[in-house]
Structures are given as C-alpha cells and as structure tokens.
Amino acid sequence: MNHLQAAEAVRTFSAVIERCADTGLLVGYVPGFPGAHSQGETLDELQANLQEVIAMLLDDGEPALDSDFVGLQQIVVPA
C-alpha cells in the first residue's frame, strides 16, 4: 500500500467528551454513530478506546449514521 492509499484508508470522526460526575471518568461518544462510545481515565486512554470501538463497528460494515456532527456553540444567558 503506498502513501496515497494509506491516506485514503483513514476515517475521521468527531467525538463529544464529558467528565462523569459520579465516576470522574472521561466519557466520549460520536454523535449520530450508534454504539460509538467509550470511557477512559485520561484523554489518551479515551481516544485509544474510541478508536478501538469505532474500528470494530466499521469492521461490521458502513455505519448508518443517525445524524451529522455540526459543531458546538456557546450560549450566553444573563446571570
């Protein structure tokens, strides 16, 4: 596989990351991608776990995404 073929084989997904108030763990999920969620004690661990989960899901075939991630927006309201 040459460099161009390797680059074409890469998929990129956006994940939302939150810290669980109960466990203190980082929890991540890919919006609109059923089953694409995981947790970890560090950002590096969470990223590795999400990569593993997503790779396994992609091995089962092309995902039927429920929605497309658009972005995050901060909303300011009076205190």
Image (cartoon, rainbow, N blue to C red):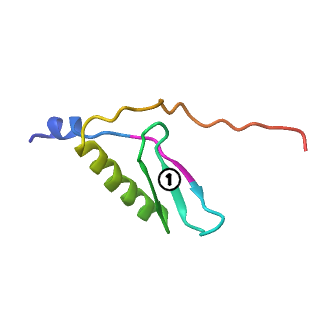
- Residue at image position (80%, 38%) is 76
Q: Does the magenta run of residues contain 26?
A: no
Q: Amino acid at mark 1?
A: Gly
The residue range painted magenta reads 13-17
From the viewer's side, name the closer residue of 46 and 67.
67
Return the residue found at the far left. Answer: 1
Relative to the observer, which residue lies in front, 23 or 19?
A: 23
User: Residue 58 placed where, x, y %?
Assistant: 27, 43
75 lies left or right of 65: right
Q: Is residue 35 left or right of residue 61?
A: right
Name the image quarter holding the N terminus: top left
Identify the residue at horizontal 64%, vertical 67% (top origin): 22
Crowding at dot 1, Cα within 10 Å, few <14 / some 14-19 / many 20+, comes out as: many
Provide the residue designation for mark 1.
28
- In the displayed structure, does residue 64 sit left or right of residue 15? left
Residue farthest to the right, as pictured: 79
**Is the residue 7 above or below the residue 54 in the image?**
above
Residue 43: x percent and y percent?
Answer: 48, 61
Q: Is residue 14 magenta?
A: yes
Q: Residue at x 38, y 59 (%)?
A: 49
Question: In the displayed structure, would residue 32 be above or below residue 39?
Answer: above
Residue 20 picture quarter = bottom right
Image position, residue 23 (x, y; %): 59, 69
Picture residue at 31% right of the left edge, 39% below the top: 11
Q: x, y percentage for residue 46?
A: 44, 60
